[in-house]
Amino acid sequence: MSSSSAAPTAKPPIRDALVAAAFRLFLERGYEQTTVDDIVALAGVGRRSFFRYFPSKEDVVFPDHERCLADMTAFLATGGPEHEPVRRVCDAARLVLRMYAENPTFSVQRYRLTRQVPGLRAYELSVVWRYERALAEYLRGRFAGRPDGTLRADVIAAAVVAAHNNALRSWLRSDGEGDADAAVDQALGHVQRTFGRPTAETWAAPVRTAPEPAGGQPAEPDDVVVLVTRRDAPLWRVVQELETALGRT
Amino acid sequence: MSSSSAAPTAKPPIRDALVAAAFRLFLERGYEQTTVDDIVALAGVGRRSFFRYFPSKEDVVFPDHERCLADMTAFLATGGPEHEPVRRVCDAARLVLRMYAENPTFSVQRYRLTRQVPGLRAYELSVVWRYERALAEYLRGRFAGRPDGTLRADVIAAAVVAAHNNALRSWLRSDGEGDADAAVDQALGHVQRTFGRPTAETWAAPVRTAPEPAGGQPAEPDDVVVLVTRRDAPLWRVVQELETALGRT
């Protein structure tokens, strides 16, 4: 970072030094056996400096999540109605991947540490939950007024996070080898195909499979539906048409 | 419970008395202001009795989750290949709803408490994560050998949990008024329609929208697809046919 500001978000050298010292000790002695005093002694700074950057020892394990959450929220806030909502949350999730992929060695070390320390696992779950809520809140806004809008928003946000983390964990377990971007693209592609939205035309309707009944009586509902769609229509739009025609909305 | 066993899982009177005393104090004084000593004094038992049933003060807030997790795991383990996997995990999730709905007053009180105490919120997230992993592990087994099997398993498990919790939270926020079963059925129905599997027939194919080109040359791919389906066909099967016809598999 080239910023001359000393604000914690500018990631000054002291903050970096604290993270480096903490991880060196966590790996050498174990997380539980390392105190904040040990960390500040190795980094050559005072306790107050530590707590200026990190509220607790747990926070130093995840030094970039607050920034990433802020980046995600800002990214979603700048989206307009022209952005397809499911694609937008998938792109927002990629910000998390970028944070992990910026420093593969650190990310893999942290992954191993988090597997071993239940308190860190709980911390990580609460971070993941905050990402998921940020995505869900954005989608709730985009789906406002739709029947099942909040349900749909919550389900898609959870699906995006699960797909992202499935690919991320595979990459971390491979010690950061392999192409993290390709793995996450493939996983998020699965979610976009399942939930993504309309951009072209499609049409569906029940059709009559028996002759008109005599005497002008209303017929029973027909048991066959025909759908005609452009080959390039998004699957979501086609499914929406189908649900209407099948009477399942 | 009519069991004469004194095992903790049989929910004997002491355990119930500890939960009742704890909640009375949490509501009167607040969670943080209540100690384990306060709880055992009100319940009229010793500290050792408390720790016999609950590893920590947090655990007394969620006295039935371990039993429910065990019930869920057992339910999933008894499923055979005849059970449609998405439906099976939805039915497993209903066991959690049943636990909440057994005692609406207690569930609503706990919901409010959990909203106020960050430590309890973190505890709850770890419990939700364990339910989600139980569902995902079952689905991974059912989808073994499928391309994207683990991805699909993780995404569906997350979607089921998100849908279940969306409905559960609505019911808790309504102070336990309203029909919890109907709300959860509706939410899980949304997931089943999105991901559920084939049981009936459907058919889709590209159709020719222009005359055969002269000279027997192969035509360009047609840009329209027609699908014919029984009205009672499951949406998943219809979408699978469509994906094939649209060339998106």
Image (tube, coloured by chain):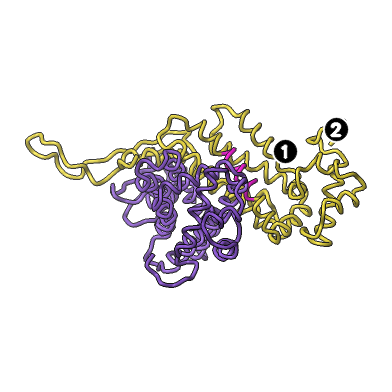
Chain colours: A yellow, B purple
Please say if B178 is above or below B161. above
Residue type at numbered disc 2: Ala
Residue A126 is situated, as x and y percent measured from the top left of the image, at 63, 47
Please say if A172 is above or below B9. above
Q: Which quadrant: the N terminus of chain B?
A: bottom left
Please say if A5 is above or below B82. above
Quarter of the rendering containing residue A113:
bottom right
Secondary structure that dominates the magenta span: helix
Q: Is residue B196 left or right of residue B50?
A: left
| Nearer the observer, A244 or B40 | B40
Give the residue pinned by disc 2. Answer: A6
Residues in magenta?
A: A125-135
Chain letter of mark 1 equals A
Q: Is residue B241 left or right of residue B51?
A: left
| Nearer the observer, B90 or B34 | B34
Residue B24 is situated, as x and y percent measured from the top left of the image, at 50, 48
Give the residue pinned by disc 1. Answer: A67
The reply to whether residue B151 is in sight is: no
Quarter of the rendering containing residue B118:
top right
The reply to whether residue B167 is in sight is: yes
Q: CA distance from mark 2 to mark 1?
A: 15 Å
Residue type at numbered disc 1: Arg
Quarter of the rendering containing residue A46:
top right
Residue B117 is situated, as x and y percent measured from the top left of the image, at 60, 44
Q: Residues within 10 Å of mark 2 (few under 14, many from 20)?
A: few
Tag nearer the camera, 2 or 1: 2
Q: Residues within 10 Å of mark 1 (few under 14, many from 20)?
A: few
Which of the two discs, 2 and 1, labels the residue nearer the N terminus? 2
